[in-house]
Image: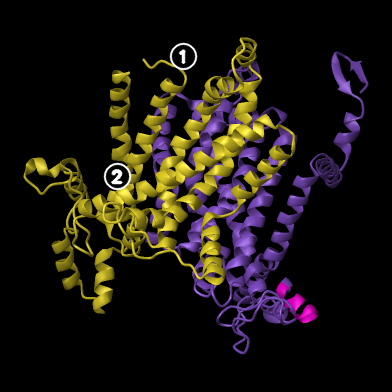
Chain colours: A yellow, B purple
Amino acid sequence: MQKYIAQRIILMIPTIVMISVFTFLLLRVFLPNSVTDQILVLYGRNDPELKAELEKELGLGGSKVVQYFQWAGIAWFWGDKKGVLQGDLGEGLQSHRSIVGELKRRVPVSFELGIWGQFWAIVTSVPLGVWAALKQDKWPDYGLRSVAILINAVPGFWIAILIITFGAIWFNWAPPIHYKSLTADPVAHLKIMLLPALIIGLTPSGGFIRLIRTQMLEVLRQDYVRTAHAKGLSETTVLYKHALRNALIPVVTIIGLGLPGIIAGTVIFEQIFVIPGMGQYLINSVNSLDYPVIMGLNLIFGLLLLLSVLLVDISYAFLDPRIRFT
Amino acid sequence: MAVSELGGIAEIEGWAEVRERALPVRFARGTWYFARKKPLGFVCGLIVLFFMIIGDLVPESANKVVKELNNLSSLAGIGDNPTSLGDSPVPYLADVLEKHTGIIHPYQKQDIRHRLDKPFETGQYVLGTDPIGRDVLSRLFYGARVAVVVAFGATFVASVLGAGLGISFAYYGGWLDKYAYRVVDVFQALPGLVIYITILGVFGSGLWQLVFVLGGLTGPLASRVNRGQAIQIMASPFIEAARVMGASDRRIMVRYLLPNVFPLIILGATLGLGGFVLAEATLSFLGYGLPPPFPSWGQMLQAEGRNNMLTAPGLAIFPGLAIATLVFSFNLVGDALRDVLDPRLRGSR
């Protein structure tokens, strides 16, 4: 098991390197204009001398390959400044703030929001999916399936806007706009997180309900479930210990693979509910072409995805003891 | 069904007759079969068709072609009166409807006297107007064009790319296959929305950028399924037979593998359409869609809906409803087509 995990982590390295090379090529080679142009526009001037000076100051002049090595921290071994390998993502070109410092503040926020979203999705969809499977082809089943299909089609951000709109019109209520951290004011924090998390959880829950239903139906037809019934086990034991555990395996895959997407998907809800997470940071930095920030964020998002794929694979072993890793 | 043995070949009676019928007849038969078998899916298909018609694509492209022809002929000096057809010889549905009904207007027309009209209040602007007096209904219609073009365009790009990559990787195999899927893993490791925002935000956005970015990044992911199927088919004897007969690599891929992978490609495409509509709406909502004068549903929600939600909630309701309806229809058509085309996959999602 440990060997397997170590192997998987080593296999991640080339993927991570390729992600960073891809983003670097995109931002520094294929893109015609850069952050210096944007800064110069602010001053309304366009002389090449100033631009060259600015580029030198920001470390954008010279060879692109050298710049990549500087960013990655390989150049550090020859006495250059610290890079990614040393745990330093550099600083934002516009704000001159340390990117690692910003991320330390922002990653937990987005991560928490995404986890809450998944939490609500699972908490609501597992019992509903099981219920729909037990009542197959009766009205709860039809109702839930229609709701699930409807949910799949409705964009989450529209629901958010409707809730804000009609909350304001009918109840004179608006979501709080001043963000409070969990440690500073737990109650206010949870109040801020609740509504976005519920809406984030809504979108995947439609798919989850349908998936859990079909999986349950599949499993309930298996021989071992009949055996469990024949042994005289109680209905709850059969359902939750024998059937649900096996039905959940593909669900875990979907949940795990969906987690980074959910965290990336918080971008839009952070925008609507004014939550200072990675999404806001991404949009600001993309609009100002702040390339070290964009590269850092893509790296983090890619890493999150790879780690969750690994976690999914590991969790198989716990759900299905027959699966062994070699 | 009567089967008669003809020289060792089983022939289904009436098959030749079916083959001889003209394509439109067969198409109509197929549609009728689909409608009877899957009425809900058929209705949703009609809704999609409705969105395509109100999106009013035909005049746009027809007018462009005519304009090009006019330019060419005037450059070449042929035709004494090249502008005789006018600027838009094929009338826009919106223009025609405005003339005849008075409730549908060109999407960019601003009526300063009617700002933020309430829906269903005046006969002139059925769904009301936005803060600078543009008709919401017509803007929704134009948004349908954007949504439909992006959905079909991105699906087309993704399908072609997915089929091409999947089949050629499966066919050539070896190190190409192995390392190519390392690269596809990287694509999969890039979180969709983040990379879309990065590319569109950095390179500027427009209709074709949306189509190619959405389709181009989905294509490699879609290729996995095609590759799996193609590898299975590669093992069947008829590929061997083709090779013995001296078929070239390209011929085997195009004439033998592609037709067998085709149902999967169609399924993937129909099931992906709704997702592209949602992706387009999300990107437009965040401001990475079409530039402002052109309305798209996501952008209408953001620019007009959110800013005027207290005075005119309709601006936030209707674009969302339009998105939901179109995505819902695409999804149900996809599900119904899947059931009809491939019963083995039923209920697998």
**Which element is circle 1 on?**
loop
**Residue A322, which numbered label?**
1
Answer whether residue A229 is magenta in the image: no
Residue shown at 45%/65% (left/top)? B287
Asked whether residue B96 is in view, the answer is yes
Give the percent coordinates (x, y) of residue A37: 27, 69
Task: Name the residue: 61% across, 39% down.
Answer: B268
Q: CA distance from mark 2 to mark 1?
A: 37 Å
Circle 1: residue type: Arg
Q: Identify the image quadrant of the C terminus of chain B.
A: top right
Along the line of sight, the residue nearer the viewer: B348 or A145: A145
Q: Is residue B99 magenta?
A: yes
How crowded pointer 1 is (Cα within 10 Å; few <14, some 14-19, many 20+) is rated as few
Q: Is residue A209 above or below residue A222?
A: below
Q: Quadrant of the N terminus of chain B?
A: top right
- Regarding residue B81, the answer to whether it shows in the image is no
Q: Quadrant of residue A158?
A: bottom right
Q: Which residue is mark 2?
A: A20
Question: Residue B14 location, x and y as percent?
Answer: 92, 29
Q: Amino acid at mark 2?
A: Ser
Q: Is residue B223 left or right of residue A281?
A: right
Q: Depth check: A68 or B319 in front?
A: B319
| Rendered view: A57 above or below B265 | below
